[in-house]
Amino acid sequence: MAAWRKFKFYPEMMQMVRFIATKLMYVLLTLFLLATVTFFMMKAIPGDPFMGEKKLPPAIYNNIMAKYGFDQPVWKQYLTYMNNLLHFDLGESMKSANRTVNNIIQNAFPNSAKLGIVAIIVSVIVGIALGVIAALYHRGLIDALATIIAVLGVSIPSFVLAPLMQYFFAVKLGWFHVAGLKEPLDYVMPVLALSALPIAFIARLTRSNMVEVMNSDYIKTAKSKGLSKAIIVNRHALRNAILPVVTYLGPMTANIVTGSVVIEKIFGIAGIGKYFVESVSNRDYTLIMGLTLFYAFILIVARFLTDIAYAAVDPRIKLNSRGGGS
Amino acid sequence: MNKRKKTGSIMLALVISVSMLLSACSNNGGNNAPTNGGTNTPANQAENNKSGEAALAAEQIFRMNLHAEPPTLDPGMTQDNTSGTVLNAVMEGLTTVDKDGNVQPGMAEKWEVSEDNLTYTFTILDGATWSTGEPVTAHDFEFAWKRVLDPTKETPSPYAYQLYYLKNAEAYNTGEIKDASQVGVKAQDDKTLVVELHSPTAYFLNLLSFYTYYPVNKAVVEANPKFAAEAATHSTNGPFLLTEWNHNESLLLTKNPNYYDADKVHFTEVRLAIINDSNTELSMYETGDLDWAGRPTGEIPIDMIPSLKEDSEANLQIQGIATTYYFNFNTTKEPYDNVNIRKALAMAIDRKAIVEKVTLGDQIPAFGFVPYGIKGQNDTFRDEVKDSYFTEDVEQAKTLLAKGLEEKGLTKLPTIELIHNEGEGHKKLATAIADMWKTNLGVDVSVQSQEWGVFLTNRTNLNYQVARAGWGADYNDPMTFLDMWITGGGNNDTGFSNAEYDGLIKKAQTSSDPAERMEAMAAAEKILMDEMPILPIYYYTGIWMQKPYVQGVWIDYSGEIRFNYGYIAEH
């Protein structure tokens, strides 16, 4: 019997490898399709990087367009771009002369990442804490307060919350700098603006699961055995209650990453999001493509990690089952 | 309540602790300069106190918002105001322009002009040096200008046409001639630069203060063509050094101790923030994180202007700048090919109401195209030539409209399609004018907001009926406004063509008699207003706030900021 079990271990490994390989293939296919669609859509919108209220003389304009290969048919430009992409060369920004897109991402991403990671950690910890407290004091005053916070978090968009915080905490009370990300305190407002929605969502999710779990038979058994409340919550209830939160990690990362576009602008943080919006209105083709692909890559990786995490946490989920968490 | 407060503080503590962890391991910016400055305090502070009008504060740090990342700090590649604002502080051309708009010597200590006004001989100032230590020579200028004009350059210079005043410059830039030595700029020796012009240009000395005419450090650029991408590799020659450039975040300029006029430069540091949210900028001004907000690089939200005007602490400033806001008519499209219809529309709006109730910034109603602030012969052009070309008169507008419709064989004007680029201000103004046309002339108007790129493409391709437009000065002469309406002009997005107008512009361009030039340009503007291919609305104002202790910083005629000789008064 024991030998047979060992034998079975091997196919499980294979299953894992196959799972990851298939996922990677999907990742590449998604990126390829996205690059293609973005490229042609981008070329289809009117305008170009060298337009302006004051037009360039035709000779200069045509010369510049030719230097960037824009005089070529679009499919040729597409092939050139894809070829460069295969070599991980995202090209030179057309607006920021002499700066490569790779360089811009390298410069800007650490700022976005710092903010994003803090926001994710804060969301998870505060969200779960709020949810657990609300569930433990089910139908009490604290539960009501937690619900109010949750509803506010879900319903106030970050672009409203951020200026409100700036006005009260920075202008009126003078607790924080209005903008920037230089000191630890500078993180408070942008992080809260980014994580308000995920906190609210996670709190609601945790609360409803907690309430359900606390009423289940095995918790009642534990209570009747005389175990302390702390042990029951930590050892028995919480683990089961936060399972659904793991599934929310993927969408939450997406939320925080996209939310940072607005937050970075409002708080003047030199991250990817601040470049992204400008790149579109500037028709900075290479930067639009580079940032779109980079965003997509981050989101796909977040999804991928969520899938694996979910499979790891919940043994009932099989790796090869379709759409596990995605 | 108590518990809620507690959760709040727990949340705060959590954010702080996590962020501390992360920021501790990422101290790469080097941007942690002490906020109380004083590290760069020059020894001659006491001397400075004598020269200033008010007593100088101990700390001479000026902080303003640049609003956007400068696309480049290569003067040869620059074509935008943001980059220009930085370049004006860290670099300098042969001449500079003072507060009154008069040309002053810059890198050139003196010059001689030939009798035919075609040849200029400049002598480079002794003691003009690059930040890297070498002297600025005439060769640097020759190299810089030819580099801008070189059509085979890896990235061609968009503003090369600013140098088309030089002999053979256009021919070389467009590839007609291949030999760069035929271009009218030549360094005779290290100190002497000889410049030959294509035709006499009254405002040429003024042009030389513009960034496309700045020199570049030949040795540095030849070694590294991408020198201007980072602060560390840049070589500058202006009153300030480019000390830090944290992309899309901030720039730090520090006083250049080797600048020839360093005695008159007071700011030890100029900190330029890059915040592209105008509400954030306003908050930063309120908390004292900025000494200056709004014009030229920033922006004050329109709906805040009325309350800021009342608020004496805000210290709101409004000053006319040389830019005109107007509508284009597509004169190739019926019925806008009819002059009476165009005139009727121009006469049927109330410009005073627009500036008082819609734009709110004390803008000046425009009845001409050349704005205030542009030099004429002795005074400004607008003061010498009044813009009394037409008046607002609803009754006459109705008569003209009826006449125009009759000429076109129409009984009613088809719905007017008015397009503008995105922006709350443009939208409000377009809607107000649509309403005036509806009320005064009984015509229907459909107002459309279009994304910038889409809008520009439509306007360029004459795919519109009436379109919003704005034009600012490139140089201080009425020509910068009037030459755009010549037949087939690159920026003439109206299809307007008038042989007499073209002739007058040609005459003004080639004449070297100031009186004759001004007369020709005034006559041309009159034709423009008689034919009305454009509908002038208002002359812009620059709106900004400056802390009362900021002195000696000014906004020039075109709306650009000049802070090189500014100082912080004791407060």
Image: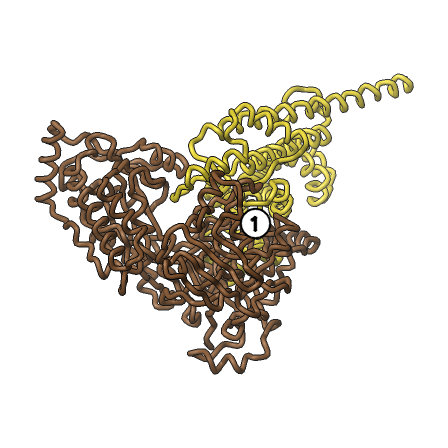
Residue that appears at 61% across and 48% down: B226
Front-most of residues B131 and B563: B131
Pick whichever, B217 or B182, lies toward us.
Answer: B182
Compared to B135, does B485 lie above or below? above
Q: Chain of mark 1?
A: A
Whether residue A307 appears in this view of the structure is yes
Give the residue drawn at x 35%, y 64%.
Answer: B317
According to the rendering, which colour does chain B have? Answer: brown
Q: Which residue is mark 1?
A: A270
Find the residue positioned furthest to the front. Answer: B115
The secondary element bearing badge 1 is classed as: loop
| In this picture, residue A162 sits left or right of residue B17 | left
Q: Nearer the viewer, residue B527 or B409?
A: B527
Q: Could you say where residue B54 lies in the image, as x and y percent from the top left?
A: 43, 79
Which chain identifier belongs to the yellow chain? A
What amino acid type is highlighted by mark number 1? Ala
Residue visible at 64% across and 27% down in the picture: A83
x, y percent for residue A123: 60, 44
